[in-house]
Amino acid sequence: MFVRLLPLALATFAVGTDNFVIAGLLPAMAEDLGVTVPAAGQLVTVFALTFAVSAPVLGAATSGMNRRTALLLALAVFVAGNAATALGTSYGMVMAARIVTAAGAGIITSAASSTAVAVVPPERRGGALAFVMGGLSASTALGLPLGTLIGGVDWRLTLWAVAGAGIVAAVGIAVGLPKVSLPAAGFRARLAPMKQPWVLGVLVVTMTVFAGSYLLYPYVGVAAEGLTGGSATALTVLLLAWGLGTLTGTVIAGPLTDRHRPERVLAASLLAAALVLAVSPVMLAGLTSAVVWAALWGLCVGIPVIPQQHRLVAHAPAASPILLGLNSAAVYIGIALGGGLGGLAQTWITPARLGLPAAAITALAFALTLATTRRPVTGATSASASASASASPPDLAHRTETT
């Protein structure tokens, strides 16, 4: 099963690397394009905003396509955008290329996730989602340092490498993935779950989870400056521990979600994350304790996406591309909100104590999780559940073709 899902994981790895690595390339890009570093930083902001908008909108527009076609289309746009970025000779050209890239990336994550859950039986959805989203987590642990290393020679080479990863993923999908169609439903039926308060509540949970995490994460270098002394090596070790912890959390989230209710897995991870963040001022006192703390925090951060996706897919399988697109948008909105709150918080507390408001917001996410534990049973939900049951193996042939 997981061999078939490997190209999907590579696709999410390429998206994650493309998203995170730009931050490490900004000084070189700014110098080459003749702009300031803050101006170059807007490339990251525009990418995130375009991703947040395109994920649900283009997810809805492509929801009627079979998943292989949607993925190949999205990867073509993604690869073209990265190639255009690498070839860009002006700030305006690179900005436009990043918008194109984000539009393709916005479809890839939700399409890859909805494909993963469509080709496995319901009891293995968690493992399939964890495997595919593991590519995104691996990009944090491995793609970011590797991309930054390549970019040290020429920032354009990193974008070519990401485009190459997208091409390899596209070839794997074209050759190894069957045509996967979602349960039959009209466009209005696919949009129906978006009107349900419970769905909105789940999306707010996702947004709050990442707002709490990214209130601290972008500023972890400043927060840990007292122990790193400005050492790039020490900071790299700290970030690597966080990245490996995140990857581990994503990997174990799948089996946990398959064995236990996703709400329980989510609530446990958020409660643990709130506690870990609350003790951050103490743990950042020494390098060893800081590395252990970063790994534990990363572990907690890596878990929530999988049970959240599982909850949405189980609620309305036919609308999974739209719901997963909205969930991806909520992730990026949360990241942007957290970054803004983190900058604002530094006007009244020292960076070393940013973990405290981050813990408070994560605790709020925990409370919201408890409030959305019970999934409503509506006519639309029942119909979706019936469609899911009729479409699950052994009736998989009705929605999965071998050519």
Image: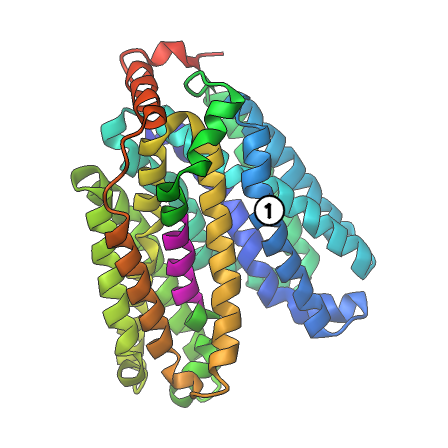
Q: Main secondary structure of the magenta part?
A: helix
Disc 1, SS: helix
Image height of 381 relative to 344, above or below: above
Image height of 195 relative to 82, above or below: above
Q: Say whether residue 275 is magenta.
A: no
| Residue located 55% across and 21% down the image | 65
Q: Position of residue 6 (x, y in %)?
A: 41, 34
Q: Which residue is mark 1?
A: 53
Image height of 26 relative to 124, above or below: below
Q: Which kind of residue does numbered mark 1 sit on?
A: Val
Instruction: Tell me if residue 365 can be seen.
Output: yes
| Residue located 65% across and 34% down the image | 76
Query: In the picture provided, is 222 more to the left or to the right than 167?
Result: left
Magenta span: 203-214
Q: Position of residue 114 (x, y in %)?
A: 42, 31
Query: In the picture provided, is 13 more to the left or to the right than 98?
Result: left
| Residue located 32% across and 72% down the image | 360
